[in-house]
Amino acid sequence: MSDEVLLDVQHLKKYFTVSKNFFGKTTSVLKAVDDVSFQIKKGEAFGLVGESGCGKSTIGKMIVGLYTPTAGKIIYNGIDLTSLPRKERRQYCKDIQLIFQDPYASLNPRMTVGDIIAEPIIINHLRPKNEVEKRVNELLNCVGLSSNYRNRYPYEFSGGQRQRIGIARALAVEPKLIVCDEPVSALDVSIQAQVLNLLESLKSEFGLTYLFIAHGLSVVKHISDRVGVMYLGKLMEIAPKNELYHNPLNPYTQALLSAIPSIDPTKRRHRIELKGDVPSPIDPPEGCRFCSRCFKEADKCKKFNSELKEVSKNHFVACSLFDGEGERNKHLQNL
Amino acid sequence: MNEIENAVAASPNEEFTDKPESIWRSMWDSLKQNRAAMVSLVFILLLVAIAVITSAFPQVLPHNPYEQSLTKTLLPPNSEYWFGTDQLGRDIFSRILIGTRVSLAVGVIAVAISLTFGIIFGSIAGYFGGKVDTVIMRIMDIMLSIPSILLAIAFMAALGQGIDKAVIAISLVAIPEYARIVRGEILSVKENDYVQAAKVVGNKDGRIIFHHILPNVLSSIIVRATLGISSAILDASALGFLGLGVQPPQAEWGDMLGRARNYIFQAPYTLIFPGLAISLTVLAFNLLGDGLRDALDPKSRQN
């Protein structure tokens, strides 16, 4: 991992219009992603976790260009992708790819596996025509599939094999950054490990950078270098993997980590049980997003929303408990 | 890496050694089970053969379909004139056979034209959405709100008489229906992950529509088009009945009906046979369309 920043996401927002009045004026919006900033360094795997509906997939789709951000910047290699017109934006498809969550929906049922993988190569003119087939075979072997499968249709494959095909398609354009949108959550546990190992070996083989989106901390722990924790459209905490797992600072992260089941009975730790449900992103709480469920709730959290701050090296937390240096120490003593 | 390859190699799937069964192949297999559809298909192929042979070699017809004979008007069916003769003494059987070409051509060409425009408008409206969608679909709605035969007559009034104009009028009238179906199907497919994947790898919009979306909605469009042929034939007959289709002396089933209607009590066979020809052809296309729909719908597939 180098110190060079490959992707810099700044104050990214995505609001979806939920309803409009008769005159076409927006009356209610869903704040799927609300002011999120983070950086991904070249060659690292950045994990993004959070429960369903917290906006993590929306971020991924904005980075690959499937959604247009409401506000904010996505700076890739020094170029702000959000400011580019549609045509130029498409040039960067080659660099940033997406691996989908559902391997059953992400492959065109009317195309053979060979065509699915060859298409990105052909439309981006990456290889002369007579070398395309060779390249497809290469890619299939890369993801652990036999090149004889070229003429098969997707429905002939199992979930894990389909996910491999999806990975081969993403690799076909020789990307630098791959957004993995819960790539293993639809797979059997035994297959999950295989696919994760594959992703890891591909990362070192091709020098890839990952944005790894998942809803479980255990999967992210396996593959990421740094982890960002999201809640209701906001980033709550960013820290290197080990730091986050051993020294979670944000109350939400603490609750999330305490929910990981442990198979070691001697290690059983105190589980933090949160009250209530996740509030609706259409009408999120004022102040801190987590304040309605936080077990350390302070009065000022209801009014004041604190930004991400670096509390120790590379460890960023958005929580008003860490706003003043003195209070931070008090909090640390309580831990 | 190696262990992954081994893991995959260790679980070979025997079925993979066969050639894959294509979707068309399995559709055909399931269509073969449907007796009504198969009979219809044979009937339609027979009609096509008649149309081709009679226009290439008119001498195979038992009589000249255009030759009038005022001494032999309105003869009932007999061994020489199988279906009788019409008010001008022409052989009805020969006229029905030669009229097959016009009716089939009208059906197929009209559907081809309206389908082309329907796919273009429907795809644009469904894929891009927003204002484009609103404008296109409101125009289609307006066209749909006018009774189709009335609209066709209005187009004929503007375009002039003749069978070619009738085909244009019929296809213009049918465009909104196809546009609606295509739009609906595209809306249901375009949010699929594989369409999004196609966008992510850098496909242009046109290629996404034609390579990734349309092949996946083709089955329902084919079914609708087959059914559409029958309604185009009916529309053509209706225009012919109203005297707006072919020009005399050319034979066309609807036109034959229209000109014979004064003799309905005197010589009912002058109407029965052209009427039967229309009904059977339309029925065959409808049954084939139904069969295709069942064959293409995986839920109703029997295996």
Image (cartoon, rainbow, N blue to C red):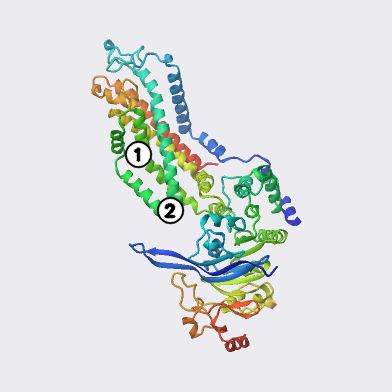
The location of residue B147, given as percent across then percent down, is 29, 40
Note whether residue B300 is visible. Answer: yes
Alpha carbon distance from label 1 to label 2 = 23 Å
The location of residue A74, given as percent across then percent down, is 56, 65
* Residue A257 falls left or right of residue B48: right
Write down the chain letter for disc 1: B
Residue under the point 45% across and 25% down: B48
The location of residue A314, given as percent across then percent down, is 64, 76
The location of residue A211, given as percent across then percent down, is 62, 64
* Residue B189 falls left or right of residue B72: right
Amino acid on which the number 2 mark rests in the picture: Gly
Relative height, residue B83 to residue B179 (above, below): above
Relative height, residue B200 to residue B232 (above, below): below
In front of the other: A295 or B107: B107
Query: Residue B173, which numbered label?
Result: 1
Residue A273 sits in quarter:
bottom right
Write down the chain letter for disc 2: B
Rendered-image quadrant of the N terminus of chain A: bottom right
Amino acid on which the number 1 mark rests in the picture: Val
Note whether residue A164 is visible. Answer: no
How many numbered marks have been drawn onto this rendered protein structure? Answer: 2
In front of the other: A197 or A135: A135
Disc nearer the start of the sequence (1/2)? 2
Residue under the point 46% across and 37% down: B291
Say which residue label 2 marks.
B129
Relative height, residue B213 to residue A330 (above, below): above
Disc 2 element: loop
In front of the other: A158 or A309: A309
